[in-house]
């Protein structure tokens, strides 16, 4: 199942990012889970505000990182879908 | 009190801990016959006071702990639970309240959320009042749990349902899964009773049959596929019917630490059953020193301690030789291969005993806190 461009993804309640000072990276904290975030994950979540659509997120990332939209779309889709499957994110 | 002196370790084979289980109290309104707390319970007077818990949370955060599990006994039995949740938020720890639900009211739960509680894990002893209250030994417990589940989701707190399964309720797993979904839980833990301590006395009453365990595994797999994106299911299988051991604690002293109500720090919940281990106490020793230098934490860290067949086994990086406490209990040697493992000389005996217990029945003795 893929996320339509008009859908709005948001982190569910009780799911938050944190800078892990001890390990020097960002993590996503969720019920009984701590997911280490790489730079790409951090960049995607920075644009996932809860009010932006998936299409808006792709636009923002494409502009900010000067990357072709169609090139990043698959990776962003995959990342967000993995969070949806793990009940850390939902789309409206 | 003379604190044992932690020994320096030669080689660092582990990172900082990710999770800490704070067992705030052994007091509990339920009296489940598979209680996983030690045979000798800590009395209220010996529990750590609020300020030591709070200072320990601070040390844990500095050490690298991300997730703090507040457990017991029943953590809501502690009147300072509110202050402890505030401390979790102050130190940016992700707080997880592991509760039976008894001792919570709608107002108290809302107050805990206000103070920064991140997640509620609610235990479930059965899918109806008759089964749940029979196992928990607490009349009205089931109805209260249903209320707590409603309040939790209404407050938009994430809810995990923790269903302990055994011979008497494992066949009702489909109803358990439906209940988790209809409650709006995001996670379900299906945990087969671990036969240590108090539960070990009730093997005949609680040991599932091999068939039951197999069906349970299949049902979990089917539900995971069907409910992807709806419900996350974590599963602790019946290891006495398995061929390989569970990766206990993800490896001894590698990812987490446990603090028991009197302040002793252990690599796992049952480590006190290994008689030669000496545990430092947060009352006397800084948490970082304990994590890095405690002889108990270093005893089974990494792979150097392993005897054969574990030492040369290609599964050792996956299951870390299994459970040390089970090796202690069954083989009489905490460094032995977990008897669950097909390579253990005790495997056949363990499986035969499990099979015999599965087809036997016995009384359930409730766990009561001594007066």
Image (cartoon, coloured by chain):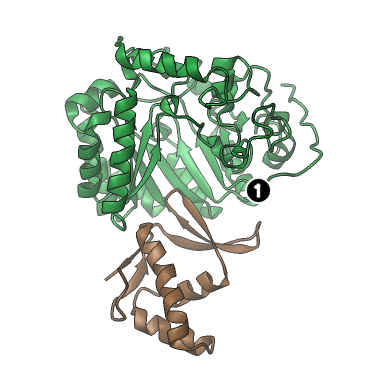
Residue B126 located left or right of residue B43: left
Task: Name the foreground residue: B349 vs A76.
Answer: B349
Chain B on-screen colour = green
For disc 1, the chain is B
Q: Is residue B183 above or below residue A16?
A: above
x then y, percent, for residue A26: 57, 64
Quarter occupied by the N terminus of chain B: top right
* Residue on which disc 1 sits: B16
Please name whichever residue, B259 or B188, is drawn nearer the observer in this view of the structure.
B188
- Above or below — where is B234 with respect to B36? below
**What residue lies at 69% left-to-right and 36% top-to-bottom?**
B303
Residue situated in front as seen by the camera: B155 or B322: B322
Quadrant location, the C terminus of chain B: top left
Can you give x and y, in whole percent of width and height, for residue B5 in the image?
78, 28
Q: Helix, strand, or loop for circle 1? A: loop
Give the brown chain's letter. Answer: A
């Amino acid at each position: 199942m893929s996320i339509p461009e008009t859908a709005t993804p948001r982190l569910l309640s009780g799911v938050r990012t944190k800078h892990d000072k001890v390990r020097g990276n960002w993590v996503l904290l969720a019920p009984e889970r701590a997911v280490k975030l790489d730079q790409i994950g951090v960049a995607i979540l920075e644009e996932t505000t809860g009010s932006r659509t998936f299409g808006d997120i792709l636009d923002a990332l494409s502009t900010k990182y000067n990357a072709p939209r169609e090139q990043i779309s698959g990776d962003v889709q995959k990342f967000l879908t993995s969070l949806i499957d793990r009940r850390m994110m939902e789309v409206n | 009190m003379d604190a044992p002196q932690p020994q320096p370790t030669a080689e660092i084979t582990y990172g900082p801990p990710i999770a800490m289980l704070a067992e705030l109290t052994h007091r509990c309104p339920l009296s489940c016959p598979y209680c996983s707390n030690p045979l000798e319970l800590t009395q209220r007077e010996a529990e750590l006071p609020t300020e030591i818990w709070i200072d320990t949370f601070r040390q844990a955060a500095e050490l690298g702990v991300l997730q703090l599990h507040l457990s017991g006994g029943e953590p809501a039995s502690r009147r300072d639970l509110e202050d402890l949740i505030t401390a979790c938020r102050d130190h940016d720890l992700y707080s997880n309240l592991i509760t039976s639900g008894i001792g919570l009211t709608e107002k108290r739960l809302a107050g805990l959320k206000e103070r920064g509680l991140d997640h509620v894990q609610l235990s479930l002893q059965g899918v109806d009042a008759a089964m749940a209250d029979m196992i928990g030994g607490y009349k009205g417990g089931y109805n209260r749990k249903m209320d707590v589940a409603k309040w939790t989701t209404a407050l938009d707190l994430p809810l995990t349902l923790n269903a302990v399964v055994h011979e008497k309720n494992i066949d009702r797993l489909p109803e358990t899964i439906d209940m988790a979904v209809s409650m709006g839980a995001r996670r379900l833990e299906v945990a087969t009773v671990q036969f240590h301590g108090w539960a070990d006395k009730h093997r005949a009453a609680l040991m599932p049959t091999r068939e039951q365990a197999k069906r349970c595994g299949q049902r979990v797999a089917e539900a995971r596929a069907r409910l992807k994106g709806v419900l996350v299911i974590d599963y602790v299988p019946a290891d006495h019917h398995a061929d390989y051991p569970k990766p206990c604690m993800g490896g001894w002293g590698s990812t987490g630490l446990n603090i028991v109500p009197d302040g002793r720090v252990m690599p796992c919940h049952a480590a006190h059953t290994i008689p030669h281990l000496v545990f430092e106490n947060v009352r006397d020793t800084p948490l970082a020193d304990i994590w890095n230098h405690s002889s108990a934490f270093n005893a089974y860290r990494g792979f150097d301690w392993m005897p054969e067949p574990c030492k040369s086994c290609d599964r050792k990086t996956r299951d870390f030789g299994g459970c040390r406490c089970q090796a202690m209990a069954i083989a009489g040697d905490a460094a032995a291969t977990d008897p669950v493992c097909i390579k253990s000389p005790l495997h056949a005996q363990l499986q035969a005993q499990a099979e015999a217990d599965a087809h036997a029945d016995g009384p359930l003795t409730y766990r009561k806190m001594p007066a």
